Amino acid sequence: MSCPSVNWKDAENGLVLFTPSEFSFSENLRYLSRSTNECLYEISGEAIRRAISIRDEKLLLEISGESDQFLTVRIHKPVTHQMKAEIAEYIHDWFDLGASLTPFYEMAQTDPLLKKPAEQFFGLRVMGIPDLFEAFAWGILGQQINLTYAYTLKRRLVEIYGEALEYGGSKYWLFPAAETIAGLTIEDLADLKMTVKKCEYLTEVACLIANGELSKEDLLKGDVKAAERKLTRIRGIGPWTAHYVLMRCLRFPNAFPIDDVGLHNAIKVILDSEKKPSREEILTYSARWENWEAYATFYLWRVLY
């Protein structure tokens, strides 16, 4: 079913998706360009190409923004109106187009940490990871390693176990399904060159999702604390990974990975400080961010790229 808040219209070869105020396509494109080793989409000029799966059908999307008022989405083959509605929903979620950022920017105007990033990156959205397993996998892959190596691990996982759509002489990869990874052993994952523990966490989470024991619908039934409790009961999912998933996939506005090293480094950079902030200092700063912790974190991370 199409979500009523998704504002789109049919177009020849695709659709047009209307964007809220305080949206900048170019600012989001700059964020999405942060790694040259990204394997799930390709940015060419002012457009993003990405393969997604709708109703078990692989589709190639080309998303461009001639104006900040709407996105033009071209689809590489004809699809039904209902499939277009689901594509619009996916992009709406990916770009967090349902959020009104007016209160965030009003708060940031007088915030010592957020004032400059909010002005500098105006129109940036918390770019999401709509697929629950992909969000978990990215959180697990990124545990206690640098971002560059996390991208290398993701590429290995995707190119060994993901499916690809071939079009125009290029391959466009889809993230492996939970069902695919659930059936693997630790030995199967040896080529990823990942720690045994991470391989275990990845396959166990895949099993929970594939079996229907873990779903977005279930996690969204309660508040952020209830969802965090459910997530941290899973082996290998600590508060950092839980809040990463709560923020990037489940869209809790008050998700807050307070122990994130990138967050600490960004605060250090903005304050031009020699030392990282203590947890108490971060709690003091974040007291003003109530219900905007996820956006505050994302804008502070952006300072580092």
Image (cartoon, rainbow, N blue to C red):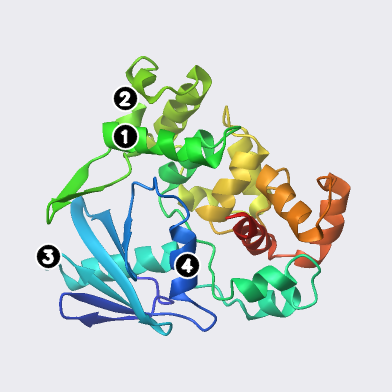
Label disc, if present, on residue 77 of the rendered structure: 3
Q: Which residue is mark 4?
A: 28
Q: Amino acid at mark 2?
A: Gly
Question: SS at mark 3?
Answer: loop
Q: Nearer the viewer, residue 94 or 24?
A: 24
Instruction: Please tell me which residue is depicted at 67% across the width and 59% down the height of the picture.
Output: 300
Q: Nearer the viewer, residue 44 or 177?
A: 44
Q: Nearer the viewer, mark 3 or mark 2?
A: 3
Question: SS at mark 2?
Answer: loop
- State how far apart marks 4 and 3 are (Cα): 26 Å
Q: Nearer the viewer, mark 2 or mark 4?
A: 4
First along the sequence among labels 2 and 4: 4
The answer to whether 146 is drawn above or below residue 253 in the figure is above
- State how far apart marks 3 and 2 are (Cα): 32 Å
Q: Amino acid at mark 3?
A: Lys
2 and 4 marks in contact (CB < 8 Å): no
1 and 2 marks in contact (CB < 8 Å): yes
User: Is residue 57 in view from this perspective?
Assistant: yes
First along the sequence among labels 1 and 4: 4
Q: Which residue is mark 2?
A: 183
Question: SS at mark 4?
Answer: helix
**41 sits left or right of 201 in the view:** left
- State how far apart marks 1 and 4 are (Cα): 31 Å
Q: Amino acid at mark 4?
A: Asn
User: Is residue 221 in view from this perspective?
Assistant: no
First along the sequence among labels 1 and 3: 3
Q: Nearer the viewer, mark 1 or mark 4?
A: 4
Instruction: Please tell me which residue is depicted at 50% across the width and 20% down the height of the picture.
Output: 195
